[in-house]
Image (cartoon, rainbow, N blue to C red):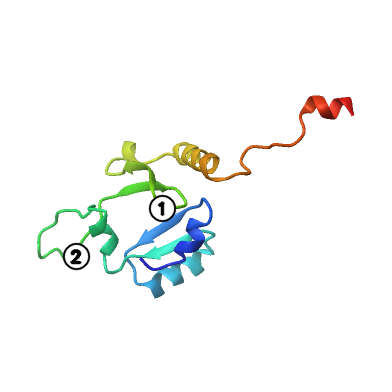
């Protein structure tokens, strides 16, 4: 997949993989003024590697189609959670994604917990 994968790995964030060519993905990114990363899998390599290819007739006009999964990934790109989105109830809610981000940030960021002075020490001063 092409895209700014380093920027995604260096922080917790959102990325959108698509099947469009890199130039089209960049145009979509620019047109939306997106603050997240668009990745291009126009050769459909990632869906093969992840084994999420939908079984379609050989003459299907759209080629290979990905099953609608949502992955929460850690900064090292290991999978934290998988959501099967075939049905509305299988798609992650915003709260589930927020909880995933919280867990990932807590595990990955050294500055997640505040280690400043306690309230008692401030009140004594």
Sequence-first tag of 1 and 2: 2
Say which residue appears at 76% left-offset and 29% top-offset.
118
Taking the spot 21% from the left edge, 55% from the top edge, the residue there is: 53
Q: Secondary structure at mark 2?
A: loop
Asked if the residue under mark 2 is in contact with the one under mark 1, i.e. CB atoms within 8 Å, the reply is no
Q: Nearer the viewer, residue 10 or 90?
A: 10
In the image, residue 62 sits, relative to residue 83, either above or below, namely below
Q: Is residue 66 above or below residue 116?
A: below
Say left or right for 102 vs 90: right
User: x%, y% of residue 113?
Assistant: 63, 37
Say which quadrant the C terminus sits in: top right
**Would residue 117 be found to the left or right of residue 9 on screen?**
right
Residue 11, given in percent of the width and then of the height, sits at 53, 53
Please name the residue shown 30% across and 68% down the image: 42
Question: In this orientation, which residue lies closer to the viewer: 50 or 19?
Answer: 50
Badge nearest the viewer, 1 or 2: 1
Q: Is residue 92 above or below residue 78?
A: above
Residue 16 image label: none
Q: Is residue 89 left or right of residue 104?
A: left
Q: Residue furthest left?
A: 58
Look at the numbered disc 1 and give the secondary structure of its residue.
loop
Residue 72 image point, x, y percent: 41, 46
Q: How many marks?
A: 2
From the image, tell me which residue sits under label 1: 77
Assess disc 2: are there few (<14), some (14-19) or many (≥20) residues with their C-alpha within 10 Å of its C-alpha.
Answer: few
Label 2 sits on residue = 63
Q: CA distance from mark 1 to mark 2?
A: 27 Å
- Which corner quadrant holds the N terminus? bottom left
In which quadrant of the rendered view does residue 115 lie?
A: top right
Residue lying furthest bottom: 23
Q: Position of residue 79 (x, y in %)?
A: 37, 46
| Callout 1 crowding tier (Cα within 10 Å): few <14, some 14–19, many ≥20 | few
């Amino acid at each position: 997949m092409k895209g700014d994968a380093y920027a995604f790995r260096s922080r917790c964030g959102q990325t959108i993989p698509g099947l469009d060519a890199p130039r089209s993905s960049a145009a979509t990114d620019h047109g939306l003024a997106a603050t997240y990363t668009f990745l291009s899998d126009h050769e459909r390599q990632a869906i093969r590697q992840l084994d999420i290819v939908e079984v379609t007739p050989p003459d299907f006009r759209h080629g290979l189609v990905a099953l609608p999964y949502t992955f929460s990934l850690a900064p090292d790109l290991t999978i934290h959670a998988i959501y099967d989105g075939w049905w509305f109830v299988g798609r992650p809610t915003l709260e589930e994604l927020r909880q995933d981000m919280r867990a990932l940030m807590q595990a990955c960021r050294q500055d997640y917990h505040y280690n400043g002075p306690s309230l008692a020490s401030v009140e004594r001063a």
